[in-house]
Structures are given as C-alpha cells and as structure tokens.
Amino acid sequence: MCGITAYVGHQDALTFLLQGLEKLEYRGYDSAGVTILGDQKLSTVKTKGRLQDLITILKAQPLHGHVGIGHTRWATHGVPSNLNSHPHSNADETISIVHNGIIENYRELKDELMAHGYTFQSETDSEVVVQMLDYYYSDDLLAATRQTLARIEGSYALCILSTHEPDKIIVARKDSPLIIGEAQGAYVAASDIPALLEYTKNVYFLEDNELAVLKADSITFYNQQGQAIQKESVEIPYDLEAAQKDGYDTFMLKEIYEQPHAIAETLRGRIHENKVYLDELQNIDFNQYHQVYYVACGTAYHASLCGSQVLQKLTRLPVTAMVASEFRYNDPLIDEKTLAIFVSQSGETADTLAALRLAKSQGATTIAIANVLGSTISRDADYVLYTCAGPEIAVASTKAYTTQLVLLILLACYIADRLGFVLDAKLLEELPHISDHIAHLLEDHERFAKYAKLLEDQRDAYFIGRNLDYASVLEGALKLKEVSYVHADAYVAGELKHGPIALIEEGSVVIAVATQPQIASKTINNIQETIARGARVVLFTTAGQEVKNVANTYYLPEVPAVLQTILVAIPLQLIAYYTACIKGCDVDKPRNLAKSVTVE
Ligand code: M6R
C-alpha cells in the first residue's frame, strides 16, 4: 500500500510530484522516490525514510524535466531501504515504473527473467514489472505494457515512463486506486484525489484492467481488449483546503473537531418528519432477505458491530458482523437471500473488497458504506451510501467512524421501516441534534485530557462495556493503542471475572462505558470488582445510574441509548489523542500503519 504520482505536461514535473506525495504520505512513509525524464535520460532519486528526506536530497540535487513519476512506500516485499524504494528502472535506465499493489506471481516471473539473463537490484515484487517491460519492449511501449500486464497476477496501480517514448506516461490499474486529473497543460495521476486538487478538480476514474496513455495535451483510454474507449471526467465537489490542517496541530485533532459538521453533512436530507430517506436503496425489496452480513476491518468493523446489533434489534432478522479478513475464509453462508453490507472509509481496503466480491459472486445483494467518492468498493457494490465526512487524512479514523455509526443507524431504521416495523420516534427526533451534543462534549476537552494523564506511565489499559458499549470500548482501545502505543484491551465487562481480572493490580487504569440502560448497572458492578483490586477507573455513563467510589465519572448527555455509541466515541478519541501527545508520539502517522490498507 503506497502512494504514486505522475505528471506529463509543460511545467517542471517535480513540483507536482512532490506536492502530491506529501498529500499521499498517509498511504505509506518508509521510503520515497521520483524519476524525471529530461534531456533524453531518466534521473531517479530515492531514499529510505520520510518524504522530507527525499526533499532534502532533491534541494541539493534538483531534477528538471516535464515528465515524471513519484512514489511513497509502505513496505510489503523487502525491507524499507534505498534499493527497495521506487521508482524501479531497467538495467540501461530507459524504462522506469512506480507500483502500488502486490504482484502475487513475482517469484515465478523473476525466475523466468533471470533465466533470460536479467539481474535484480531489489527484493521487491514490483521490480519484475520493469524488467518484464524491458523484456517485451521492441518499439511500442503500449504493446510491451499489455504483454507485461497479461503476465501479472495480483493487484497494481502502475505509472510507466520511458526514454524511448518521452512524450507519454502509461498508467494502468487493477484492484489498486488510480485517479487521473486533467490539469492546465498537463495530465496528472495519483492514488488519491487530494494529491490532484491543487492542479485540478476534473478527474477520470480508471476501472480495473483499463489503461491510459497520458500526454501533455491528450489522453487516450483503453479497455482490457486494447480498444480505445471514451471516458467522462467527474468534477470533485470539495477543495484542497478540506484536506489540510486548518490551524490544528494535527489532522487527527482537526478531524475530531470536524465531527459535528461531518455528521450534519451525513444526515443532510436523510430524515424528514421522523422518516428516513435513503433513496439510493429504494429499488431493493428488503422482504427477500433471510439474513444480513456486515463486513469491514478495524474501526469500520467496530461501527459495523454496532450497526448490526441495531438492525437485529429493530428487525429481528439474523444479523452477523464479521471482520473482512475472516469472512472469506470462514465459508460464509451466502445466497440470493443474503444482504451483505460492506463498510469502509477509504473504499479500497483489500480484505473488504475481496469479501465484497465473494459475496457478490455467490448471489448476495451488496451495499457499500464508503467515504471516498468513486472508490473501488463503492463502485463494485450493487448500492452505495456515502458518509460525508470529507477527506480523512490522519491514520487513526475518527470522523469516519462516527459518520459510519450515523449512517448505519439510519440504514437500520430505514430497513426496519421498509419491513413495516414501527420505529422509535425519539431516536429519529434526537438524531438531527447529535452534532450539538458532540459540540458540547468537545468543549469538555480538558476533562478528557485529565483522564489521559492517568495513562502517562501506563503500559496497559483495560476497556470494559456490554452490549452496544462493547463496540464502543473496542474502538476506544484500538484508538488508544494505535496512536499512543499503550497496550489496550477491550473486554465484555461480564467476562472480566473469567480471566482478565487477574491482570488488574494497584494503579491499573480501567475505562468503562455503561450507557445502555438495561445493562449499565451490571457494568458498574464490574467496575467495583476492579476498584477493589486497586484499579483507577474512568467511567462514562448516563444520569440516573448509581455510581459509588468512581472519582472520574463523566455523565454523557441524555439521548436515546443507541445514540450514546456516537457520543462516547468523542471522549474516547480525545483520551487516545492526549495520551499520544503526552507520550510524544507522531499522532497522524503512527508507526507500522498506513491509512489505506490495500494488501491482504
Ligand atoms: O478504509 P477502511 O475503513 O476500510 O479501513 C479499515 C481499517 O484499516 C481502519 O479503520 C483502521 O483500523 C484505522 N487505522 C483505525 O483507526
């Protein structure tokens, strides 16, 4: 999972490439590189480390030319190193490529090329692409590209340039994102829209197995069969400013504070006189389904866990939430009477995409809940609903999560209504005001910073909750570990006494969520068991619960129980954020992670 950029036009290519890579650094940041075609030769500069390291080298040794490609890497095959960094070139440096994805049959292709006398510089799967291009090239780069792609198994977004045909860049994609922009006197390409926005809002989405030949003044698209095809450009409705920090120290904090707005946007036009409108789904006959799956990864899975419980409660349909990487290998029971819902902020997560394709191939109706417009999952699903969170840059998902919760609650209400169930009017009356409650919670940030102080010297934290609160604590624990590196586990509160309580000792920090009225008092009792063993507890609950001996109790605003899942996310995100700050962590770019996980 990497970020790639490409430029062919009349200006210096390097300027576009570097600004684009900066926007894509969230996709990987263990090495970076560029190749520029100028004076009939390719010049490549690449280095292990952050993009800033590359920029420092390029300041001392600038590259000039009107055609170029760039890459920021998240290592999959081969350690982060200068040699494993992209771009990769052939031996006589006439062809250069950047690649995002995984070439699954690279070992076999490498053996074949080595038998033909090729030698390899790197340990990457990607290098076989450029060597194979070299092998097939006689006098037509497009033909060589086609022959190469026909041999490749796996996923790719590729940008290819060559001194043999210096006026063009060839781009291709399969199962990895690649967007092309039509700029002033140039065509540009990148893995994600923010990298293009400084140059253009007019973009083309390349479909799987399609190719495009970019020149300064023209673009030609080809389908898998090699026929030239026409494509319409799409205008992106948001601007670059939305993708920048806006005065906040970090993207994560900015995105936490954007939640009232993001949720209001997601709700826009969806509720009218206590009725939910999801017109995108109006052609579905929900009576045909006898089961529903929710499939997602990470934070999106936690939102799904919540959404699935709400749907089951409202409709009494059998509903299962599954982690996408398990779904495919679990022999799921899928047929034409299955509704499968796939939740993904990026819309590019490889496990979720593969699960979607499996469900589709076995006859399920598929709905995507995605945030990124035009992403692969959103295009592959039968139906799509967009969360309107805007670009989420921080690796730790915050506003995407709460907007997913909102949309999943709306979806559950919508399906229940379409099936003829009577809805809880209070829930739909209160949902449009949820942004105001979040704004008030954000004003209490100092309280949450104080709770974070409890974790200052801790290696571990324990999160407990029951029922819908369990989904919330799973997310709270994930947030804490990914940004602050404090090991955090989430437990169903009733399970504590079956083992985990053995870990509680003097000074342990327990974060408890008890907002669901039918079960809150039981969680609060479990807290007493940890206090008796020396734990320091932070409790999030609602007015009316009897709480004894818990100094750090925070009473959440009164809203219907289902909506507490949205509210409690805010303090849990802020606790994770402030803990990471206290510990001096790189909040937006946690180690070993990347924003968009396009490898299985
Ligand atoms: O883009 P997606 O929603 O499909 O991503 C799924 C997970 O990779 C993502 O939620 C991940 O767990 C985040 N780092 C959590 O903050």
Image (cartoon, rainbow, N blue to C red):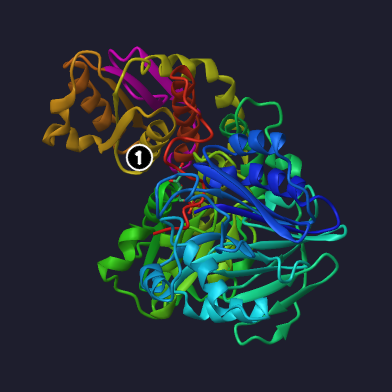
Determine if the C-beta at disc 1 is less than 8 A from ligand 1. no
Q: Which residue is mark 1?
A: 474
Q: Residue 409 in magenta? A: no
Location of residue 26 in the rendering, given as x and y in whole percent from the top left corner = 56, 43
Q: Is residue 254 left or right of residue 479?
A: right
Location of residue 591 in the rendering, given as x and y in whole percent from the top left corner = 43, 36
Residue that appears at 59% across and 21% down = 443
Across the whole image, how many numbered discs are drawn on residues? 1
Q: Is residue 293 above or below residue 336?
A: above
Location of residue 390 in the rendering, given as x and y in whole percent from the top left corner = 65, 47
Q: Where is residue 374, by image quadrant?
A: bottom right
Location of residue 526 in the rendering, given as x and y in whole percent from the top left corner = 21, 27
Q: Does dot 1 land on a helix, a strand or a loop?
A: helix
Residue numbers of the magenta segment: 536-563
Kind of residue indicated by mark 1:
Leu
Q: Residue 559 in magenta? A: yes
Residue that appears at 30% across and 60% down = 326
Residue that appears at 51% across and 73% down = 132
